[in-house]
């Protein structure tokens, strides 16, 4: 299922307000792992593998014409990725020979990963001359969540891989220079931390 909605409003002074929301819900219940019987190599019982991935995102922005030559924008965005899956193991690693009793897949439980990311962005453009446009922007991104629940989380609990909790900062500066009507030279520097 996919759902998208957006709205925008432009005030008489040229300031634009916009909102959006999006939801994608993907499921797959048709995958399965098939046991292998030995010595015949015939197919055995199947272990179903169900997955579900829900991606929600929403945001708002305002774009302001500060002067005839300067535009600035402020935006906030939120994204949530919710991934649910079955934790399945087998009695054989990929590089091992088939065990005497065959290959057996076992569902050891379900697991879920939920990560929320919020971003705040500020950008501005300045038409410094007829042929020269200068731009800059800053973005703060904060992510929090877990990469697994249940048995998988227990096994990851003693490592740094069990949780997501980070911030990132991004700064960008750029310029465009119109050499001719058909040729523009552009450059951008971005710093992420």
Image: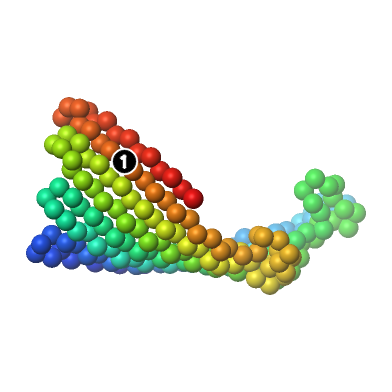
Q: Residues within 10 Å of mark 1 (few under 14, many from 20)?
A: some
Q: How many marks?
A: 1
Circle 1 — which element?
Answer: strand
**Measured from the top left, where is residue 188 in percent x and y?**
35, 39
Q: Residue at x 26, y 57 (%)?
A: 73
**Measured from the top left, where is residue 132 in percent x and y?**
20, 36
Which quarter of the rendered picture does the N terminus lie within? bottom left
Q: Residue at x 65, y 70 (%)?
A: 149
Q: Tell me if 68 is positioned left or right of 157 in this view.
A: left
Q: How is the image coloured?
A: rainbow
Please tell me in which quadrant of the rendered image residue 165 appears.
bottom right
For residue 9, above or below residue 192? below
**Measured from the top left, where is residue 117 in percent x and y?**
47, 63
Q: Tell me if 168 is positioned left or right of 30 in this view.
A: left
Q: Residue at x 62, y 60 (%)?
A: 31
Q: Tell me if 156 is positioned left or right of 191 in this view.
A: right
Q: Which residue is mark 1?
A: 174
Q: Nearer the viewer, residue 17 or 140?
A: 140
Q: Nearer the viewer, residue 9 or 1?
A: 9
Q: Is residue 127 visible?
A: yes
Q: Residue at x 39, y 49 (%)?
A: 171
Residue at far right of view = 100
Please tell me in which quadrant of the rendered image residue 180 appears.
top left
């Amino acid at each position: 299922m996919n759902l998208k909605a957006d709205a925008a409003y432009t005030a008489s002074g040229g300031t634009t307000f916009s909102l959006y929301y999006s939801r994608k819900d993907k499921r797959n219940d048709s995958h399965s792992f098939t046991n292998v019987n030995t010595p015949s190599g015939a197919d055995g019982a199947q272990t179903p593998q169900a997955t579900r991935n829900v991606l929600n995102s929403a945001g708002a922005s305002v774009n302001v014409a500060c002067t005839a030559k300067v535009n600035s924008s402020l935006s906030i965005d939120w994204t949530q990725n919710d991934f649910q899956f079955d934790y399945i193991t087998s009695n054989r690693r990929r590089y091992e020979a088939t065990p005497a009793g065959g290959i057996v897949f076992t569902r050891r439980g379900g697991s879920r990963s939920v990560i929320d990311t919020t971003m705040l962005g500020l950008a501005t453009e300045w038409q410094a001359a007829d042929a020269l446009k200068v731009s800059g922007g800053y973005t703060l991104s904060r992510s929090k969540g877990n990469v697994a629940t249940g048995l998988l989380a227990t096994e990851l609990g003693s490592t740094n891989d069990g949780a997501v909790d980070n911030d990132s900062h991004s700064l960008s500066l750029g310029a465009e220079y119109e050499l001719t009507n058909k040729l523009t030279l552009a450059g951008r520097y971005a710093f992420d931390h």
